[in-house]
Amino acid sequence: MTQKADERAAGDPAGRRGRRGLVVTVVAVLLAVLIAGHRAVPNVHGVGSLVDSATPLLGLGVPLLGLAALLRRSRLALLAVLVPAVVWGTLYGRAWLPPAAAAGPASLRVASQNLRSGNPDPAATVGALAATDADLIGLQEVDDDDRVDAALRQRYPHRAAVSTVALWSRWPIRDSVGVDTGLGWDRALRAVVAAPQGDLVVYVVHLGSARAGHTATRDETLAALAATVRTDDASRLVVLGDLNTATTDRVFVPLTRLLHDAQAEAGQGFGFTWPAELPVARPDHVLYRGLTPTTAGVLHTPDSDHRAVTAAFRW
């Protein structure tokens, strides 16, 4: 037999490896393009938002492609895998670096939690929040106000509430009002907290839900919140809540133009909060202006399907 005949008889394993290595190369390049240009995906029926939200997780494809390239023994494929690795690291690697903490002690600590409608023990959930020594606690999906109030009133004597959102505070609340985000009923509030250093405006917000193919209501409520914050002339302002929007989602941009993200500035990692047991997204946020963040993080509390978000600030 000739060499070519021998290769055909053996099934040409080297040729198959080469073709499979080419497939890995093409997939790696496409992955890099998707990570870098995710906001170019048309936002038809919320598909663009879904891709935006999942983009940080696309980095998981890099080690899988790297393993495939090694198994195919393809140098070209290994080099190609470096492309999405570099793109992902450029966009998201900074989130994993130790944050540069602001100098000086924190003078304000906040926490926010979606309690979960039907929570069997909301007192246990908010008890975990109180244990963080937060000065302000924002809550969403508050069903059983009596049990929550009983767990918090000793440490937090001041309270403001509208429908299913509420704020508990160590310091007096001088004013509070419901905020219309376009849901037809107020599911957000604005409160003026008389902190020792001066007035602080606090929003506690639960925006419309977003699901694959159904983001219109969420988009409208986020735009309404951004419009409200844009006209608010408070020099120090904090937004606490379940915004049902990932930081990487294109519709989040109107808010990030107005406010800073505590997790991005003073936290480490992506700070995913949902679902609580194995979080893969961050719909919960602490946004701010007029303050300096010192720390930010995520807390796994009992009996909720969301993890809580926390942050500390220097006045």
Image (cartoon, grey):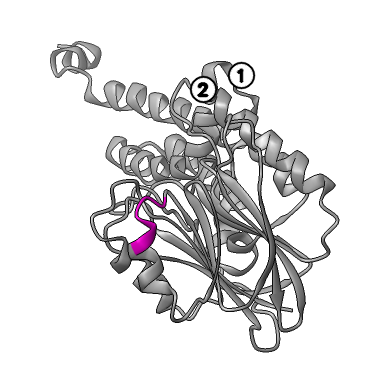
Q: Is residue 200 visible?
A: yes
In the image, residue 35 above or below residue 98: above
Where is residue 109 shown, x and y percent of the image? 58, 76
- The residue lying toward the viewer, choosing from 291 and 191, is 191
- The residue lying toward the viewer, choosing from 11 and 269, is 269
Q: Decide whether the magenta segment is chiefly helix, strand or loop.
A: loop
Span shown in magenta: 142-146
Residue drawn at x 64%, y 36% is 181
Quickly name the residue at label 1: 42
Q: Are marks 1 and 2 in contact (CB under 8 Å)?
A: yes
In the image, residue 7 above or below residue 34: above
Furthest-bottom residue in view? 104
Quickly name the residue at label 2: 47
* The C terminus, quarter of image: bottom right
Q: Compute the Cα span from label 1 to label 2.
A: 7 Å
Where is residue 273 shown, x and y percent of the image? 42, 54
Q: Secondary structure at mark 2?
A: helix
Q: Quadrant of residue 228?
A: top right
Type of the residue with mark 1: Pro
Q: Secondary structure at mark 1?
A: loop
